[in-house]
Image (cartoon, rainbow, N blue to C red):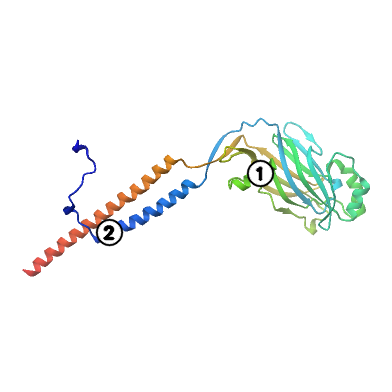
C-alpha cells in the first residue's frame, strides 16, 4: 500500500529553509490571495452568453417606435407611408402616432394622427406662422424588407397650392431624431436597465438641418437600416424579444417631392443574449487550477534559485580553497 503514496514526506532534519524560498513563498501567498478574490468576484458576477441561430419568428408585423421633430414642417402636411418588396404601399400607416404642433419650440396643440382629410386652411395658417411638428408614438409595418417614409406625398397638390403664399417653392424636411427603435418599448427600456449588450437605438440624437443656401432646393434624406432580431434572456429566464439595428445615412437634392426615407432589411439570423451565473463546480475547478498553478510555478522558481545559489556557494568554496593553497 505504501508504494502508492504520491505525497511522500522527508524527515524534518533533511528540510533546509532559505531566504529565497521564504520570499518566493510570501509572494506566492499574496498572488494566490489576489487571484482567489478575483475569481470569487467573477463567480458572483452575472455572465452573458451570446448565441446565433436562424430566425424563427413567425410574426408578420414589426413595431417601430419613434420621436422625430420637424421644426419647419406643419403637422397637417406630414404623412407616414410604407412600401415593401411584396408590393404593399400604404399611406398613413396604422399605429398610435401623436402629432404635436409646435411654435418657437413650444407645443401648442397635440392630437392623434388619423386618416382624416386635410384641413387646408389650418395648414396654410400653420405655414404662415412657421409652425413645426413633433411625431411621437409607434407605427406597425410589415416584417419584410421595404421602407417607411415621412413626406407630404398624399397632399402634393395642396402643398403646391400653399407654398407660393408663404414664399416657398419646396417643403423643408429638416428634422431631429430623438428616438427610433424596433420592438416593444417596455422591453427595450428593461433591456437598457439589465443588459449592456446590443445596439438598440443608434440614430437617437441625429439632426439633419437644411442650410440657408438650399432654401428653395428639395432635399431627400435616406436612412439605410439593417435590423437584427434579438432575444434577451434574463437571469430568471424571462425573455425580451426586440431588434437591434445598424444604420447609415445620406441626403441628396431632388426635383420631386422631398421625403425622409427609412429603408430597412431584416437579418435571417437571431442573436440571443443569455444571463447566467457561473456554476459552483466551474468555480472550484478554476480555483484549483489557479492555486495549483501558482504553487507549482513557485516551486519551480524556488528550485532554480536554490540550484543557482548552491552552485555559486560551491564555486566560492573552491575559490577559497585555491587561494588558501
Please say if 17 is above or below 252.
below
Sequence order check, earlier mark of 1 and 2: 2
Kindly report the distance in space between the C-alpha atoms of the residues bearing marks 1 and 2: 56 Å
Q: Image point 31% across, 51% down: which residue?
A: 297
Q: Which residue is mark 2?
A: 22
The one nearer the camera, 186 or 129, is: 186
x and y percentages locating residue 161 in the rendered image: 92, 47
Q: Is 60 positioned to the left or the right of 124 in the image?
A: left
Are circles 1 and 2 on residues that touch, CB within 8 Å? Answer: no
Look at the numbered disc 1 and give the secondary structure of its residue.
helix
Q: Is residue 278 left or right of residue 154?
A: left
Residue 225: x, y in percent? Answer: 67, 43
Which is nearer the eye, 105 or 157? 105
**Crowding near pointer 2: few (<14 within 10 Å), some, many (20+)?**
few
Q: Is residue 181 left or right of residue 289?
A: right
Mark number displayed over residue 188: 1
- Residue 265 in sight here: yes
Q: Nearer the viewer, residue 249 or 141?
A: 141
Quarter of the figure with the C terminus: bottom left
In percent of width and height, residue 214 lies at: 80, 55
108 vs 137, left or right, is right
User: Residue at horizontal 88%, vertical 40%?
Assistant: 116
Nearer to us of marks 1 and 2 is: 2
Residue drawn 87% across the image and 42% down it: 155
Amino acid at each position: 500500500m505504501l508504494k502508492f503514496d504520491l505525497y511522500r514526506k522527508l524527515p524534518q532534519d533533511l528540510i533546509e529553509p532559505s531566504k529565497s524560498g521564504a520570499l518566493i513563498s510570501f509572494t506566492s501567498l499574496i498572488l494566490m490571495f489576489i487571484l482567489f478574490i478575483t475569481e470569487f468576484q467573477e463567480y458572483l458576477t452575472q455572465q452573458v452568453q451570446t448565441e446565433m441561430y436562424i430566425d424563427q419568428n413567425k410574426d408578420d408585423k414589426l413595431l417601430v417606435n419613434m420621436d422625430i421633430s420637424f421644426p419647419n414642417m406643419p403637422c397637417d402636411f406630414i404623412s407616414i407611408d410604407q412600401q415593401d418588396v411584396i408590393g404593399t404601399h400604404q399611406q398613413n400607416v396604422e399605429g398610435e402616432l401623436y402629432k404635436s404642433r409646435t411654435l418657437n419650440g413650444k407645443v401648442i396643440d397635440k392630437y392623434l394622427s388619423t386618416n382624416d382629410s386635410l384641413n387646408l386652411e389650418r395648414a396654410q395658417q400653420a405655414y404662415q406662422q412657421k409652425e413645426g411638428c413633433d411625431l411621437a408614438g409607434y407605427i406597425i409595418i410589415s416584417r419584410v424588407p421595404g421602407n417607411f417614409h415621412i413626406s407630404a406625398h398624399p397632399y402634393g397638390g395642396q402643398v403646391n397650392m400653399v407654398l407660393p403664399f408663404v414664399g416657398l417653392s419646396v417643403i423643408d424636411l429638416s428634422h431631429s431624431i430623438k428616438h427610433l427603435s424596433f420592438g416593444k418599448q417596455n422591453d427595450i427600456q428593461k433591456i437598457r436597465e439589465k443588459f449592456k449588450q446590443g445596439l438598440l437605438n443608434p440614430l437617437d440624437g441625429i439632426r439633419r438641418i437644411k442650410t440657408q443656401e438650399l432654401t428653395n432646393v428639395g432635399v431627400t434624406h435616406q436612412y439605410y437600416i439593417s435590423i437584427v432580431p434579438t432575444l434577451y434572456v434574463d437571469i430568471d429566464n424571462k425573455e425580451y424579444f426586440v431588434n437591434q439595428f445598424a444604420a447609415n445615412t445620406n441626403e441628396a437634392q431632388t426635383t420631386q417631392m422631398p421625403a425622409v426615407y427609412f429603408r430597412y432589411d431584416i437579418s435571417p439570423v437571431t442573436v440571443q443574449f443569455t444571463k447566467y451565473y457561473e456554476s459552483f463546480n466551474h468555480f472550484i475547478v478554476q480555483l484549483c487550477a489557479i492555486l495549483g498553478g501558482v504553487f507549482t510555478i513557485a516551486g519551480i522558481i524556488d528550485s532554480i534559485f536554490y540550484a543557482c545559489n548552491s552552485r555559486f556557494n560551491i564555486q566560492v568554496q573552491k575559490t577559497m580553497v585555491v587561494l588558501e593553497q
